[in-house]
Image: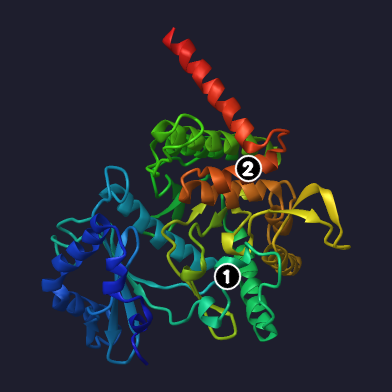
Amino acid sequence: MAPISDNWPDVAASLEIMDPEYAARVTSMVSFLTPYFHHIEAYATSLHPHHLPCRLITNNYTWGQSFAVFEIFFTDATSWIIRFGMSPMDAYFNTAEQLERKILNEVAALHLVRQRTTIPVPEIISFHPIQSPHNPLGPQFPAFVLMTAITGITIEDCGIAIHDLGKGDGDPLQGDESKRPILQQYLRDIADLHVQLSRITFDRIGSFVIDTDGQVSVGPGADFGLGPFASAKEYFAIQAEAYEKLAMAAGIEDDEGDDAGGGADAAQLKRRFVASLWRTAMMPLLDERDDQGPFPMRHGDLHSENILVDETGHIVGVLDWDCAATVPWEAFAVPTFEVSGHFRDCDTDARTGVETKILRQERPVVHNAFNRELAAVEAQDVGSKPASGRTLAALHDSDAGHVGAYLAYWMYSLACDYEETGRALHRMLGSGDDIDQSFQKFVREVEASTSREIN
């Protein structure tokens, strides 16, 4: 069997299209590790059940925002994966404290999943969450996690462009009926994963920590160390506040011809406006009955690149659990944005094809297809439900789930963007104004408030 890293993206091509400062974080990590490659191999061999020789594959490696990732290939053609924590991106992201929380969170999350579900995940071999004299690789080494590898392909490798399914309103298979069983199997397996995770609940919202006896508890969030939270209201209030801070700080290129005066002020005002829309939309959607928990476990970064399948679309591995956490049910509602999709405006009656003057919002085909699979899997499950009694399928199909999980993902990843997330939120709020009119009203309110503060 060939090394799994043979299918990873080309290193040189990937580095070439990256921001130079970010690429330097990757290359400097590799340069540091290079003299110690044989040492890493010897360490892996010492931990192997049969002490088999291995080689660290150095000609192809990969990385994310927090870790540089290498494959260790043994003489029996099995593989392990070792992930090294990279240097901080700035004063707030990928700090040593954040890396420690992420590593401990992933170790605890994988322990929970292996213990309480049938979801296929890697097994932790060894880890050290900080650089310290006690690091088993040596005091000079960064934090690391060593785990088993899982062999598989992505759903895109099966010929299904899952990223595009949430955008269209036609046939997601584009007429290729041979792929329908593959997509259906994939959606069914994600539904099963979603149901299984819903059974793992805690009385607090936060990320996971594990003690020396293997007991898992909920602690502060892995990203920024906030929490843990005792209520959904508290969690969402902090999340709304975070979006407002993101709106103030996000480094998006500004349009000098903007209607609100141009330049940075205009772009920032639009982000602040979108952040205010999210808070306004989300808070009334919370169900009081579920406010105090218990709260379910969410993967936190579930997308097609972290989901491995076989040729039939059956999930054989779920990777990268360092963002796992317990969350409110509204935030849990959408397991992955790829199988939900945003509302689309529709001015045609779907049954008759007749154009209407009333603009409606409809879900894309993949949302409805996944919801059917989720309802079917859930009907066979005798696990716990939220205190409100809402089903997972109903939550996935709800406005609360759309704002609390789906749009929340885009709020963060697109930094409160006006054109996509802002318009979606504005439509959901049902304002009589169009979004540009509402924005101008917001600008006037901000200017009036600023004037009062000055005076």
Give the CA separation, mark 2 to mark 1. Answer: 24 Å
Q: Is residue 211 visible?
A: no
Residue, disc 1: 162
Crowdedness near tag 2: few (<14), some (14–19) or many (≥20) residues, C-alpha within 10 Å = many
Q: x, y (%) of residue 149?
A: 38, 78
Q: Where does the N terminus fall, quadrant-wise?
A: bottom left
Q: What is the residue that sits farthest to the right in this orientation? A: 352
Q: What is the residue that sits farthest to the front in this orientation? A: 257
Q: Amino acid at mark 1?
A: Ile
User: What residue is at 40 percent from the left and 50 percent from the top?
Assistant: 222
User: What residue is at 23 percent from the left and 80 percent from the top?
Assistant: 59
Q: Are marks 2 and 1 in contact (CB under 8 Å)?
A: no
Q: x, y (%) of residue 279?
A: 58, 35
In the image, residue 288 above or below residue 74? above
Q: Amino acid at mark 2?
A: Leu
First in sequence: mark 2 vs mark 1: 1
Crowdedness near tag 1: few (<14), some (14–19) or many (≥20) residues, C-alpha within 10 Å = some
Residue, disc 2: 425
Quick one: SS at disc 2? helix
Residue 439 lies left or right of residue 264; in this view the side is right
